[in-house]
Amino acid sequence: MRKTALFLVLALFVAFSACTPKEKYQTGEKYHGFTLVEKKFVDEVNADCLLFKHDKSGARLLKIAADDPNKLFNIAFKTAPQNDYGTPHIMEHSVLNGSKNFPVKSPFDVLMKGSLNTFLNAMTGSDITTYPVASMNEKDYFNLMHVYLDAVLNPLIYEDPKIFMQEGWHHELESEDGDVSYKGVVYNEMKGAYSSPGRELDYQINKILFPDNTYGVSSGGYPTEIPKLTYQAFVDFHKKYYHPGNSYILLYGDADLDKELAFIDTEYLANYDQPTENIKIREQKPFDKMKEAVKPYAVPEGAPTEDQTFLSMSFVVGSSVDRTQAMVCDVLSEALVNHESAPLRLALQKAGIGRDINASFNEAKQNVFQITVQNANPEDKDAFKEIVFATLDSVAKTGFDRTTVEGILNRMEFNMKEGNTPQKGLMYLMQSYQTWFFADDPFLGLEFNAPLEEAKKALDSDMLQTAVTNYLINNPHALLMVLEPEPGLQAKITEATNAELAAYQKGLSKEDKEKLIAETNELIEHQKREDTPEALATIPMLERSDISPDVEWFSVDEKEVDGIDVLHHNAFTNDILYSNLYFDVRVVPQELIPYAKLLSSLLGKLNTENYSYGELDNALNIQTGGFSTYLTEYLEGHADDHMLPKFVVYSKATTQKADKMFELTDEIIKNSKLDDTERLKELISRHQARIDSDIKNNGLNYAMTRLRSYYSQMGMYSEKTGGLDYYRFVSDLSENFNAKSAEIVANLQKTAALLFTKENLIATVTCSDKDFKAYSGGLEALASVLPDDNVEMQDWKFDFAKKNEGLKSASKVQYVVKGYDFKKLGYEYSGKMRVLNQVLSTDWLQNQVRVIGGAYGGFAGISSSGNVYFASYRDPNLKETIENYDNTPGYLETFEADDKEMTRYIIGTISRMDQPKTPSQEGNLAVQYYFEKTTPEELKAEREAVLSTTADDIKGMKKFVADVLSQDAICVYGNDEKVDENADIFGEVISITE
């Protein structure tokens, strides 16, 4: 398993040439200040690729001239921080806060409000800071390119230290008798990030593995270290790393290359000479022997610590430029650990060490192969190490099961060649930048066929055995890490931070305090200040006439195969069948709803009548491109009381393997041994461990689900199948499995028998007409063995209550959610609500909660189903954020926007509606329209409402918002101390680990 850390001036451009890039551009020739270094047609991306070097500045540029309207521009810089201060991350935020040609507070936020981008972001990695934007509109694409180039090369950070203070950190003091505190967007973002034990584990591992180079520090910033960054060191970092000579520019898609080169050269690169320093990342010297370490992570005071320890073994292995080695290590991670019958997984299960294990391979100039066990205990350390090396010795001698390796390679090849993402440019960026950085060759990362063929030799050689010996057994550059829970650790950290701040405050003179108060107030006033019309006018934008009035419609053809209703979305899929079998969950009694979710987590991992679980994993890898089961829900007519909950069996395969795909599907849904209690216990324990990890990492999701369960049928269903209630259900089964095993087996068997019948099934497929025959043949075989039992839908009755809970955790930040169902208040949905949501999310809440409040994010959501929510992400505040939500009607009462500003909001709204899609995604949307009974006329009316929205419409929705907020339904997931401090606003305070 691979692990990953992430306008204008068109008059300058020459006329479009009908020549293809391959015909027009010649190696060694110069084009608008660029010399073409290399060109080739790359089969793996199905496009001409041209590699340039800018003569004057030294910038590198790769054009992937794909026939794809979703154009991407990206500029990346090789960045090598030397400490945990988070300088590259703070820089990534800060450069997007105004530049020479676009002197607004945040061009990024203005673009989020009003461009047709299909992707707009910036990312910081351990050795890279990168700025990708994408759009299907060429005018918009060049606008985005212009703003991003100006942001990274001409930021206002040199003139305005307030940018650093806002995005990085600053001391805040609002009054003379107040207390000094730390504030900053990145500071709070990383407090949230390091609330995750997994993030803490990676940090501690890398710090020990790489004590002398950039991979040993947190490029994002470690919370206690961020306040050590000075403003001078911050701007010096930009001077060193943000020179065009240290840049790597990727252009992808069907934009005219001549225009792109002319613009980038004339407007930016021609102004720079080559840098005097060549940025390099030094390698860490290998260790003489494996190191061992024990580190703590925070859990709340009184929280259980048994079975809460992480054990990890990590090895530094080669470099990302060796593509064959990287693929071999990917195969090794699956064959050794992640496969259902992988030898190390089985050995640790047998020894009773941990509840889940995984291996990952993190690519960089120095790669890391990592094996991690979670839900273990500190005393398991020696046994863990012994079992790992005993297993490695065994497989080095005897090798791996050939069928297992064949399946892993097949699935790897399928996924590489499928490339099932609409953001192809972004995918190719991630594939190419490592080899571009460290071998000066982006093609190495794109051309996967040759290293894949080399990796396939593992089937008939000792390649994997040699890899185990060389990369793991005989590799002293390694670490055995124990990360154990420490109750109350976060309280100690908070106490130390408060003492640090108190000491700082004590050392301030009266004049110092007055200056700090003035600086604090000046920053707050700056954050509240609106951009002037003149400044806003510098940000290029489209006109409403640039927006198509037409809706994008995807349909299904209703067919029948042997008595089963089939929904066929006709699309070219390159001979791949995307199949979904939808079984209605309403056949299940209310008390068994959680068992439907549990069943979906088990199928495909159990022994069956004809396969052991390891053999089944192999067969699925060899015969399909993917198989999974999960729950989803639709709302017919967008009405909460017409919920259609579905149990989905998803699979994909080439047409030649359709029969085998359905044969395996039948085997799984009809012949899985649900009464195999030994295997059930293993899987439920693992499932619990994964949910336990998820609930500690994704507080916002759990708070939002919990809130909606107070008033919504879909919310309650989601809570029972994926919220805190479900977590407690699975934890109870795991902890009491021996006593409840008979009950668990009986309930799973009953749930499966009710679900998997012919009458309860609607099948869907996305493929071409010519491929439908292969699909229908396989479905006929499945239909012939499904029971013809009559279906009886259950009438579920949920009890709703506004609990207003505070969910206590070890998180360092809060996730604050407030909302309700507006349809219960008598309101009807309108497309104008989409624009309202854009206004609230990109203006009001972005400014109040993120910019001023210091949270990483603040936003709203308004759904056609009636659901409305206000939410914050990685928020240092709690009660203050709720007050900001409650002040929204006041904001709307005074809302003003001229026609140009409303156009910006409308364009941003349409951007969210008009996203690129793969054929499989189009098929899924067509099925959604079918189940929800959405019509083209409905979508057209929604789009027309969006396009005709006025400032008065936004202002007129004040009462609508006020009525929603007046229901006072809230849920907060947050730091245990912070929740307790605000206990008076909650109906109940509970711990997520109770």
Image: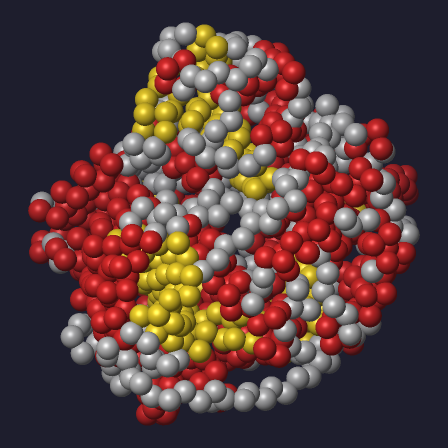
The image quadrant of residue 303 is: bottom right
| Residue at image coords 28%, 80% | 786
Task: Report the quarter where the C terminus lies.
Answer: bottom right
Residue 546 appears in the picture as rendered? yes
- Does 57 appear above or below 223? above
52 displayed left or right of 316? right
The image quadrant of residue 862 is: bottom right
The image quadrant of residue 935 is: bottom right
In x, y percent, where is residue 630? Answer: 42, 69
> Of 549 and 239, which appears nearest the observer?
549
| Residue at image coords 66%, 19% | 9
In x, y percent, where is residue 50? Answer: 40, 21
205 displayed left or right of 122? left
Q: What count of labels does the image hold?
A: 0
- Does 738 appear above or below 221? below
> Of 751 and 785, which appears nearest the observer?
785
In x, y percent, where is residue 21? Answer: 41, 19
| Residue at image coords 39%, 33% | 432
| Residue at image coords 56%, 67% | 933
In x, y percent, where is residue 760? Answer: 39, 80
